[in-house]
Amino acid sequence: MSKPSVEDHRAASTERGPVPIAVVTVSDTRTPETDVNGTYLKERIAAAGHRLAGYRVVRDEPDQVVETARDLTGRDRARVVVFNGGTGISKRDNTYDALAGLLEKTLPGFGELFRMLSWDQVGSAAMLSRATAGTFNGSVLISTPGSPAAVRLAWEQLIEPELGHLAWELTR
């Protein structure tokens, strides 16, 4: 008997239906009215047939990021939480550090692939991103940079293609 393939896993994941996804924009300047990344992600979640399980705009304060992650995850909440913003190296970029302390299992491939794909858009500046992903409290947390191009790249090339598979793996 052969081992199940990635395609088998993806096919099995679609049987579970829409994935509940939360979107969190981490920014000291954006509001729900000016949040182009949040709008984009909410539209893409709906277009992909998934369910928006929550939406927040929070300041780039570690305690707010941690509190939001705890609030949106767990039983009957978001299976995937996409954070955008706060992954750089400036003094106000705290998302990576806040989430890194929560992650139970890291998915280093997400950040590695994100930076590899970013190379085509921004060249060596890709090294400034601390995009990351991992599991926490029964959910997958994904953290992307806050630029609209970075959010689109992450969603279209990494998150959306594996969304069902990520959620399915959590419950195996």
Image (cartoon, rainbow, N blue to C red):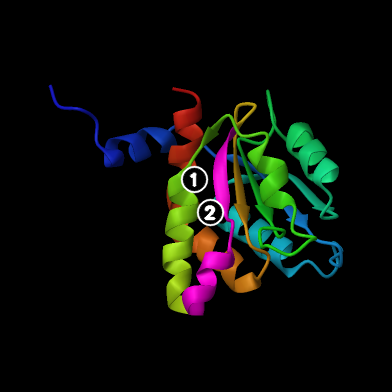
- Using residue 127 as the reference point, say whether residue 143 is left or right of it: right
Between 14 and 58, the one nearer to me in the picture: 58
Image quarter hosting the N terminus = top left
Q: Is residue 68 magenta?
A: no
Q: Are the two marked residues, 1 and 2, in contact with CB atoms closer than 8 angstroms?
A: yes
- Using residue 66 as the reference point, say whether residue 16 is left or right of it: left
Spatial CA distance of label 1 from label 2 is 10 Å
Residue at the spot of label 1: 163
Q: Position of residue 36 (x, y in %)?
A: 73, 69
Residue 72 drawn above or below residue 62: above
Q: Quadrant of residue 27?
A: bottom right
Q: Quadrant of residue 34?
A: bottom right
Residue at the spot of label 2: 48
* Nearest to viewer (mark 1 / mark 2): 1
Which residue is painted at 86% across and 62% down in the image? 28
Magenta span of residues: 122-135
Between 135 and 159, the one nearer to me in the picture: 135
Image quarter hosting the C terminus = top left
Residue 105 drawn above or below residue 57: above
| Dot label at residue 18 | none
Classify 10 Å Cα crowding around label 2: few (below 14), some (14-19), many (20 and above). Answer: few
- Using residue 151 as the reference point, say whether residue 74 is left or right of it: right
- Which residue type does callout 2 highlight? Ala
